[in-house]
Image (spheres, rainbow, N blue to C red):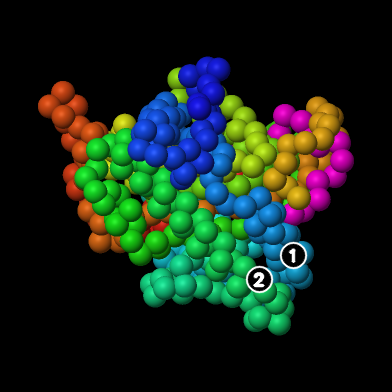
Amino acid sequence: MASNSALTDIPIVDFGQFLHGGKEEKELVAKSVDNAFRNVGFVYLKGHGIERDLVKRCFEWSAKFFALSPETRLLAPHPPGGSHHRGYSAPGVEKVSQHAYDAEELKKLREVPDYKESFESGNVNDDAQPNIWLPEDKLHGFRAFMEEYFTVCANLIHHILDALSIALNVDDPGLSPTHSKSLFQLRLLHYPAIDAEQLRNNARSRINAHSDFGTLTLLFQDHVGGLEIEDPIHPGTFRQAAPIDDTVLVNIGDLMARWSNDRYRSTVHRVGLPPSVPVTKPVPGLGVTTEGEREPFRPDVVVPDRYSIPFFATADMDAVIEALPGCWDEQNPKKYEPVTAWDYVQMRMAALYS
Ligand SMILES: O=C(O)CCC(=O)C(=O)O
Ligand SMILES: [Fe+2]
């Protein structure tokens, strides 16, 4: 079920065995996912139940959105500040930070802006952060599709929470009710084509090293590559997290690491220069494949556009985040004070845009 050739490789787990299996299969999958989150913080799930065609269509919509003129994209502007995280952010606006809350530190971090643009949407019932859409006639069908895709991804999150509940001995009904409002975030990311040289010399980054700050993240990536995760055994060294057909990459965020009393790793990751480039120019929207030849980068080469689709989950804002059962005992006591999800998220979001 889990294939790991080395401890720090990201395992591939067949989640179909959880979705469709009996008690025993579910327990086995739960154990594999638990192991992956303990050792690496990331897991590739295959058999996750999200149709390949739906993922492909999401990439197509994303490509269509980012192909609109800048003026049109800005008809759905991300509001200034970090508390209302919806709508379109132009390249260079957001710089992710790794636990840097200090204003000076954040200013310095922004000197190498992430060369990316994004569109964020969330739950239609999220009154605190209403969605910000383009006028319908600018991209007819975009909103309806994103609302559907949100629901499908949210369902998968709840199934993964069910698996974690088994692994961590959380009594029925498990962790899913702590995410009952599904106040999640669907993000379309576009990294424009860039000279390899710029990424190599760190003149620009695609996305700077960071950890996610919610509970769980789903990540769909196209076939350009360049996603890297920090090796938990050798901090400071990064390993490729290559795209794998028909899988979704799932990772632990900081809130879940804390909730699990650090049983689970919230692994630092970034997007940089891929080790090789597809020989044929990637077609936006056909991004969920690793098929086809690749060649090593030449120094003068342009790294193609990259599209990715993260889906960030977090707990209900009033959920109290305190060491879960199965994550502490007398030998391994609780490390953190209880905190509400709301207080935690506000602290992190403020750092993004302040
Ligand atoms: O583009 C990617 O593959 C990574 C995106 C990411 O890590 C994020 O948005 O938090
Ligand atoms: Fe991330």
Q: Which residue in the protein does label 1 denote?
A: 64
Q: Which residue is drawn at 73% across and 47% down?
A: 287
The location of residue 238, given as percent across then percent down, is 57, 27
Q: Toward which corner of the image does residue 67 lie, by quadrant?
A: bottom right
Q: In which quarter of the image is the C terminus?
A: bottom left
Q: Which residue is drawn at 50% across and 26% down?
A: 2
Observer-nearest residue: 235 or 119? Answer: 119
Q: What residue type is labelled 2?
A: Phe
Looking at the image, is mark 2 or mark 1 earlier in the sequence? Answer: 1
Q: Which mark is residue 142?
A: 2
Q: Toward which corner of the image does residue 22 lie, by quadrant?
A: top left
- Image: 328 above or below 138: above
For disc 2, the neighbor class at 10 Å (few under 14, some 14 to 19, many from 20) is some
Question: Does 275 appear in magenta?
Answer: yes
Question: Does 139 appear in magenta?
Answer: no
In what element is the residue under mark 2? helix
Mark 2 to mark 1: distance in Å?
Answer: 9 Å
Q: Do the residues labelled 2 and 1 touch (CB within 8 Å)?
A: yes
The location of residue 182, given as percent across then percent down, is 39, 61
The location of residue 293, given as percent across then percent down, is 83, 32
The location of residue 264, given as percent across then percent down, is 36, 34
In what element is the residue under mark 1? helix
Q: Residue 346 carries which label?
A: none
One can see residue 234 in this view: no
The range drawn in magenta is 269-285
One can see residue 48 in this view: yes
